[in-house]
Image (tube, rainbow, N blue to C red):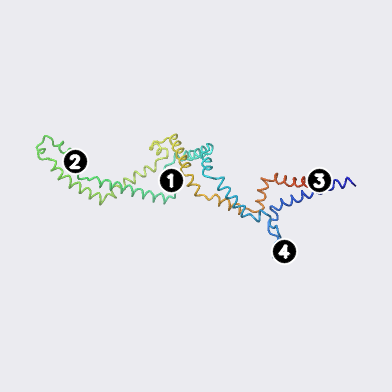
Amino acid sequence: MHYLELISGPLIGGIIGYSTNYIAVKMLFRPLKPVKIGNYTLPFTPGIIPKRKDKLAEAIGNAVGQNLFTKQDMQELFQDSNVRNSILQGVLLKLETVMDASIQDVAKKFVKEETLERKKADITDFLTAKIKNGILELDLGTLIAEGGSSVIKEKFQGGMFSFFLKDDLIASIAEPIGREVEKYIEANGDEIFRPVVEKQLNELLEMNTEEALDLLGLDVDKLKEALSQAYDALVSENIEKLLSKFDITGTVQKKVQEMDVAELEKLVLSVMKKELDVIVNLGALLGFLIGILNIFI
């Protein structure tokens, strides 16, 4: 009987320590919802985490947004050689699949056909206007006078008319012609140049992507180098702007708030189950040790 009294204290202490810690751990999550008796809500319901879920979501959001995804962290992430090479390789592989396709066919994958046709018309109008205005700014009368003077003199050199073909006479004839040409271009330039521009633009769009790159002096190696430089510039110079487009803190906070409490419990336990079990077992050990101490007090 004496031995039973000796061992009962530590055993009871261990059971009490284990039970209290087990209940305390469970009360982190349980009950999942408030327990009500009429209009009265029982204390400690719901559990601590369900009750403080909004605060927990805010804390996790701030931790992730302000500490885990800083500008420097994101730069290091995107500048990591594996990430960088994977992105560039993916872009190059995508480009290789469209090398044999025409520029127009590639464009149709990204915009609707009617949008593409409208853009082609806009580009045609823009280039036509530029060509027309450029010619009108050349001062055709002076150009014709200067260019025509040497041609006419050369043609009639040594002839009886060469004596009469002075620069002033040629200019007096050429400049009015130039003025009339300018008037004609101003009135009819759009109809003259638009078909030519449209034809050239269509020919350009019918070129396959590889031909277009060759026209620009870009082979695959140069293209890869250009993409690499563009990628590095994007990461180093624009990462802060990119980050400002994403509300990481708010997104994480919203995701945690939207999580079901049971799912949140499962997530926490998947990470901390061993640690929580240690706390429960530690309660049993402490209760057992306190029971032993009581024997000698």
- Sequence-first disc among 2 and 3: 2
Mark 4 surroundings within 10 Å by alpha-carbon count, few (fewer than 14), some (14 through 19), many (20 or more): few
The dot on residue 37 is: 4
Estimate the spatial distance between the alpha carbons at disc 1 and disc 3, rounded to whole Å.
83 Å
**Mark 4 residue type:** Ile
* Residue placed most toward the observer, 47 or 11: 11
Q: Is residue 235 left or right of residue 162?
A: right
- Mark 2 or 3, closer to the camera: 3
**Crowding at mark 2 (Cα within 10 Å: few <14, some 14-19, many 20+):** some
For marks 1 and 3, the one nearer the N-term is: 1
| Residue extending furthest toward the bottom | 38
Q: Earlier in the sequence, mark 4 or mark 3?
A: 4
Residue at mark 1: 107
Residue 68's x, y, as percent? Answer: 57, 45
Q: Report the side of 182 relative to 3 (left or right).
A: left
Q: Which mark is residue 293?
A: 3
